[in-house]
Image (tube, helix red, strand yellow):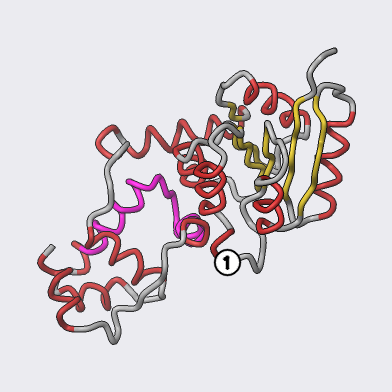
Amino acid sequence: MKRKFAVVAMDDHPVARLAVRCTLADHVDLELTALFDRPSALLTALAQQRCDVLVTDLSVPGEGQCDGLNLLRTVRARHPCISIIVVSMYDSPALMRSALQLGVSAFISKCDTSGYLIRAVRAALRGERFLTPRSRARFDVARARAGASSQNAALTERETYILRCYLAGDSLSVIAGSLGRSVKTVGAQRTMAMRKLWIENDAHLFEYAAFAGIEPKSAVGMSVRRLCAVSAA
């Protein structure tokens, strides 16, 4: 008897859950064993039942620390043998890259056709990575734009500080004043930080911060000792 692979899915939108169910229905070797609308219920179930492939969204309102990239980290840490496929309306190259670095097998945009889900599941079961042609093209362009020097570079403490302040709504002039640097220098450091993260524009920066857990922090009111430490970095 041919083995059936257990597929579990999580998405807070009923229509998206229905789409996953319908897409998998015609494939007798793929059994959709459970559907969830929130990460907390998903994590509880994964500890109790078999799952070969997890199909999950990234954004589920109200779940806090179980949302976004942290959900992927948690599943990977607790269940390293489960293949993970992300299906999301948020598909910036920065998010794709972070998800793949966390061990995700496939990343599909909700703008792509549902047929790609089956191809992604098959690839995951073979131990392969999968990106749709649209996602692959955007990923390759972002990688080329970032340049070889930024491929694996980590943010410096100052770059992180600048991004957090910028996310909090501080202008470059306010951030520059807090650091005792010129606006031009701070602007260049912000650009370099975004390049390292493969972030193309401000919209993608705010999107990435929400899923990666980067906390906005205004320069206004920060301690003098903290500002001096960052300025010296």
Is 126 inside the magenta-drawn segment? no
Q: Which residue is mark 1?
A: 64
What residue lies at 85% left-to-right and 39% top-to-bottom? 21
Q: Position of residue 162 (x, y in %)?
A: 29, 66
What residue lies at 53% left-to-right and 36% top-to-bottom? 80
| Residue found at the far top of this picture | 1
Give the residues drawn in magenta, as a range: 186-208
Is 190 inside the magenta-drawn segment? yes
Q: Nearer the viewer, residue 192 or 60?
A: 60
What residue lies at 50% left-to-right and 36% top-to-bottom? 103
Apparent side of residue 160 relative to residue 206 in the rendered image (left or right): left
Apparent side of residue 208 relative to residue 7 in the rendered image (left or right): left
| Residue found at the far bottom of this picture | 221
Q: Position of residue 142 (x, y in %)?
A: 43, 38
Image quarter where the C terminus lies is bottom left
What residue lies at 30% left-to-right and 59% top-to-bottom? 190
**Vertical comparison of 209 with 221: above or below:** above
How many marks can you see?
A: 1
**Circle 1 crowding by C-alpha within 10 Å: few under 14, some 14–19, many from 20:** few
SS majority, magenta: helix
